[in-house]
């Protein structure tokens, strides 16, 4: 990955592309690349949907290699949802293909005049940017089906649905999986709206004739990769729970812990949890001829995805993730898996973040738009309002914060205007610190304290007490930022936190590929450096300590069944980035 592709959508005479050496970004990847470019080149005070913003797409440090589970791609920009810096990553095939094509990043900048809609086709020989208005107002599934007739099934696609075209702040960018289904999404923060503002509908990536990236020390790399895979497979979470039941294995776990936010964060337990749990979901999928185990990209050894068929045995959607099952399930008082799967399909098709959309619908329920538990009503809101771009649909597509303002709801679970995911910070206090202080807005993946609070991975910090949570979140945010830069799946955190030899194999994997010696200190330094750039961007964009806070109801409303409030003080939250 020795080059950067720049596409200027504002160029006179139409969009122009140029290629330059990766330079200072050559040794980076993923989140490190996107945040460094955004931090250096995007004015922090610009409007996120203006020509000044840039959309940066970067594969990870190990993407396009034989390294296991290395298929995450990062997309960065200034977020239309939070107003701060954003990195959103996804699985699928795009990262591997882009890396094999030799690109450290694609930077899409400027904004074309007029209403034409563009597609970008990249292969080893050329980059073609062309108008294709026949793609206008196509959602992701019909769009990819149409494009396959032209470009075939040996490529990877990154696309936006109608939500991205309509510049909704919850719009995602879909990446196709190995079966070319648009099911893996860079979901958080409205990155799809930024792609839509550039008038880019789809990027087609074709690596025909390209080979895997070669390591500098092939034998060391191969040995480390083998040990790394062994470590992943022998850990009970990454080797047993996730492959058997997917991420939704957490539903029963969090519900029993009293940390499963229900009906817009009014309770920590949902009476219908067992009906929508990972165990129930896997059993249903298998009985209908689907799959409870499936990889979102080639080379995945965890296989925590799946295939969800309808009652007639026909494909409906990929296996809904834990956060999706929660946001459209317990959060909305819905306990029917088919309804949740239908909502997941429409999220992917329209191109919206499943967390933001589910929380937005739950807030709308709290505001009386429909009743909690109304599954048919929830589907109608997404299919008949958001998908059609009605005024109500645009409010919902603007995210939970916008819905709260529109319908006078005071319990709005957002930080930096981004919806909280599926863990209540009053019962899982460490994740509350991450929600409050992450540069990305409320984001569980930014520092997954649930691992230590609930799953007891990497130690044991009492989830019900504030003590030790700041240090836990800080360390996890640093480590996660580095992992997000490698292109490796975040779920490698489970074995590397518990198994020192697996962490060492990761260091050897990176070192073997790049021909260097890597230590744990190098990982920490990378994470701190990227977080510092992100913090500086947000500060220049107007963020301050008051933005690193949870909504006040988490301090004033006790959450059943433990009847606790969030106990980490503001002063402690302000210490997270003091390293």
Image: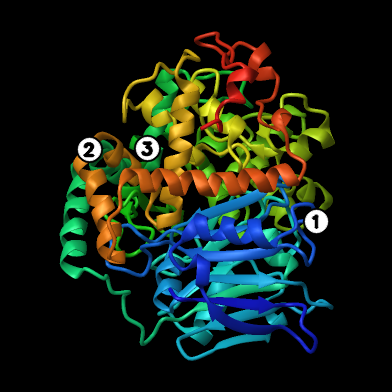
Residue closer to the observer: 399 or 414: 414
Residue 411 quadrant: top right
Query: How many marks on residues?
Result: 3
Residue 14 quadrant: bottom right
| Residue 128: percent from left, percent from top | 60, 87
**In the image, 64: left or right of 426?**
left
The residue tagged 2 is: 499
Residue 481 in sight here: no
Mark 3 to mark 2 CA distance (whole Å): 26 Å
**In the image, 491: left or right of 375?**
left
Mark 2 to mark 1 CA distance (whole Å): 45 Å
Which circle's residue, 3 or 1, is located before the other in the chain?
1
**In the image, 371: left or right of 58?**
right
The residue tagged 3 is: 278
Residue density around tag 1, few if under 14, some if 14–19, many if 20 or more, within 10 Å: some
The residue lying at 72 percent from left, 81 percent from top is: 133
Colour mapping used in the image = rainbow
Give the structural element (helix, strand or loop) at label 2: loop
| Residue 96: percent from left, percent from top | 40, 69
Of marks 3 and 1, the one in the foreground: 1
The residue tagged 1 is: 47
Mark 3 to mark 1 CA distance (whole Å): 41 Å
Of marks 3 and 2, the one in the foreground: 2
The residue lying at 40 percent from left, 19 percent from top is: 256
Residue closer to the observer: 112 or 152: 112
Residue density around tag 3, few if under 14, some if 14–19, many if 20 or more, within 10 Å: many
293 w.r.t. 196: above or below:
above
Quarter holding the N terminus?
A: bottom left
Residue 41 in sight here: yes
The residue lying at 52 percent from left, 33 percent from top is: 422
């Amino acid at each position: 990955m020795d080059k950067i592709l720049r596409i200027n959508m504002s160029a006179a005479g139409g969009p122009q592309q140029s290629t330059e050496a990766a330079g200072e970004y050559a040794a980076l990847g993923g989140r490190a690349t996107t945040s460094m470019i955004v931090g250096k080149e995007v004015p922090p005070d610009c409007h996120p949907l203006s020509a000044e913003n840039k959309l940066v797409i970067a594969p990870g440090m190990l993407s396009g290699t034989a390294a296991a589970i290395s298929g995450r791609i990062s997309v960065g920009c200034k977020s239309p949802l939070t107003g701060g810096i954003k990195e959103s990553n996804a699985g699928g095939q795009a990262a591997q293909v882009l890396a094999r094509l030799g690109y450290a990043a694609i930077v899409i900048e400027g904004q074309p005049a007029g209403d034409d809609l563009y597609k970008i086709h990249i292969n080893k020989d050329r980059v073609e940017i062309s108008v294709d208005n026949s793609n206008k107002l196509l959602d992701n599934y019909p769009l990819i089906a149409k494009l396959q007739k032209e470009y075939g099934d040996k490529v990877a696609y990154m696309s936006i649905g109608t939500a991205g075209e309509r510049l909704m702040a919850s719009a995602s960018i879909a990446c196709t999986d190995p079966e070319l289904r648009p099911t893996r999404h860079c979901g958080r923060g409205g990155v799809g709206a930024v792609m839509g503002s550039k008038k880019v509908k789809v990027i087609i990536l074709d690596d025909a004739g390209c080979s895997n990236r070669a390591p500098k020390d092939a034998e060391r790399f191969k040995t480390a990769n083998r040990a790394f895979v062994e470590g992943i497979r022998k850990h009970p979470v990454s080797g047993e729970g996730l492959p058997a039941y997917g991420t939704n294995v957490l539903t029963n776990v969090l519900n029993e812990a009293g940390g499963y936010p229900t009906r817009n964060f009014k309770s920590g337990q949902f009476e219908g949890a067992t009906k929508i749990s990972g165990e129930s979901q896997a059993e249903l999928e298998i009985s209908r001829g689907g799959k409870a185990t499936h990889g979102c990209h080639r080379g995945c050894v965890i296989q925590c995805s799946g295939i969800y068929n309808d009652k007639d045995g026909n494909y409906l959607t990929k296996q809904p993730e834990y956060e999706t099952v929660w946001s459209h399930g317990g959060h909305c008082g819905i306990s029917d898996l088919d309804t949740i799967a239908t909502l997941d399909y429409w999220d992917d098709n329209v191109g919206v973040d499943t967390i933001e959309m589910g929380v937005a619908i739950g807030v709308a329920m709290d505001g009386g738009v429909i009743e909690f538990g109304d599954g048919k009503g929830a589907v109608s809101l997404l299919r008949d309002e958001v998908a059609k771009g009605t005024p109500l649909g645009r409010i919902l597509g603007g995210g939970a914060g916008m819905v709260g303002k529109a319908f006078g709801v005071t319990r709005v679970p957002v930080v930096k205007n981004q919806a909280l995911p599926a863990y209540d910070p009053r019962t899982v206090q460490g994740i509350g610190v991450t929600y409050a202080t992450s540069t990305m807005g409320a984001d569980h993946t930014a520092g997954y304290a649930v691992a230590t609070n609930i799953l007891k991975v990497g130690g044991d910090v009492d989830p019900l007490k504030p003590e030790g949570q700041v240090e836990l979140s800080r360390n996890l945010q640093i480590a996660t930022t580095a992992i997000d830069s490698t292109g490796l799946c975040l779920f490698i955190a489970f074995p590397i936190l518990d198994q020192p030899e697996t962490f060492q194999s990761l260091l050897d994997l990176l070192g073997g590929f790049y021909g260097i010696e890597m230590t744990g200190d190098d990982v920490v330094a990378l994470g701190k450096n990227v977080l510092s750039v992100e913090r500086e961007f947000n500060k220049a964009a107007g963020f301050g300590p008051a933005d690193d806070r949870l909504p006040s109801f988490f301090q004033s409303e006790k959450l059943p069944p433990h009847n606790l409030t969030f106990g980490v003080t503001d002063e402690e939250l302000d210490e997270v980035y003091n390293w």
